[in-house]
Image (cartoon, helix red, strand yellow):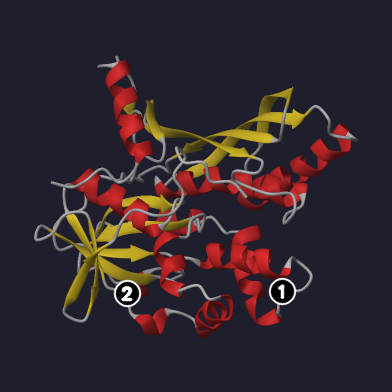
Amino acid sequence: MNKSPSAEYDLISRLQDVLGNQQAGDWKLLIGDDAAVRRCGDSELIITTDISVENVHFSREYMSLEEIGYRAMVANLSDCAAMGAIPDGALVQLVFPSQEKEIIRAAEQIYRGFAMACGTWNFPLVGGDISAGRQWVLGITLLGRVPSGGRVLKRKGALKGDCLWVTGLCGASAAGLEALRKWKRCEIPDRYKGFLASHIKPLPRVEAGLELAACPEVHAMMDLTDGLSKDCGTLACENKLGIILNPDPAQIPEEMIQLSDELGVLWLEWFLHGGEDYHLLFAASPQFDPLKMKDCTGLMKIGYFTEDASGVMFQSGDERTEVPPGGYDHLKSEIF
């Protein structure tokens, strides 16, 4: 029996119980995945939402308002990618601190970040709302559409024997945040600035999500937001299977190992528990060939699904150890 992956997962389950058996109508998927899914004629629409709160999800000490706006939109784009959908339009709810000076100029800077993401992935920001409050809060609702002939990928669907893949290096964002805390923006050594980019300007894998959804060997997918250990726990729980993590250490870049040595932090801590990488975590049959992907850069096979274990285990040689859920938990007071 798989343990619950997080207190947040338990809360969502309890809220689903409160709502009871809702009349879904044309809604094919409700609460519990990266996005909700609605049938609309012959097509399918997805809708997702995300909140970024100052001093919880971001700090102005490390990021400009433009970067904060861009990154907030990316969080929604990553959910869209995980469903195999194309972004179609966004609504923004903006709470600004009442003591903020030059609020109009500050809001414009945040919207430049929104505009950068919208322009890059070709969708409009169609409306929203604003309010005064105690700190910056950016709430975004994103609508997406599944391409004609495409399919929605869900968290459920993994099969025993499936391999676990990720579209990029786990822990790069966490490494970038640690580098920021150590050196600030201007003093980070050049060799570590790639990790800074991973944290400040992450790349949602929208194109990869579409391609993976079109691949019949891919059975389940979710975006990697709260850390590998926690998100793997969610996949294991949803699919009633265990996950064995056995990444190849040779896939870890030398710069990450050097940075971990310099800061006195194990790179494996970043890899397992670092969040906000915005990669895609997916289950695929052993027949999946990454070389058939148009862009296979960064794809890593890091484990497999099994009935011989529950939860998440890490395998090194012949030894297996349980991986407790780490990363970000919304029900804990984790702030900058």
Q: Position of residue 247 (x, y in %)?
A: 32, 74
**Which SS class for mark 1?**
loop
Query: Which mark is on residue 152?
Result: none
Q: Does 237 appear above or below 314?
A: above
Viewer-proximal residue among 289 and 178: 178
Q: Does 172 appear above or below 134?
A: below
Residue at screen point 54% across, 63% down: 174
Q: Which residue is mark 1?
A: 188
Q: Amino acid at mark 2?
A: Pro
**Which SS class for mark 2?**
loop
Q: Which residue is mark 2?
A: 247
Q: In the shown orientation, is residue 170 left or right of residue 238?
A: right
Q: Position of residue 6 (x, y in %)?
A: 34, 43
Query: Label 1, label 2: how many angstroms apart (C-alpha)?
Result: 28 Å
Q: Does 48 appear above or below 263?
A: above
Q: Earlier in the sequence, mark 1 or mark 2?
A: 1
Q: In the shown orientation, is residue 99 left or right of residue 319?
A: right
Neighbor class of circle 1 (other Cα within 10 Å; few <14, some 14-19, many 20+) is some
Q: Position of residue 190 (x, y in %)?
A: 70, 80
Question: Residue at the right extreme?
Answer: 102
Viewer-proximal residue among 188 and 140: 188
Q: Looking at the image, is mark 1 or mark 2 nearer the viewer?
A: 1
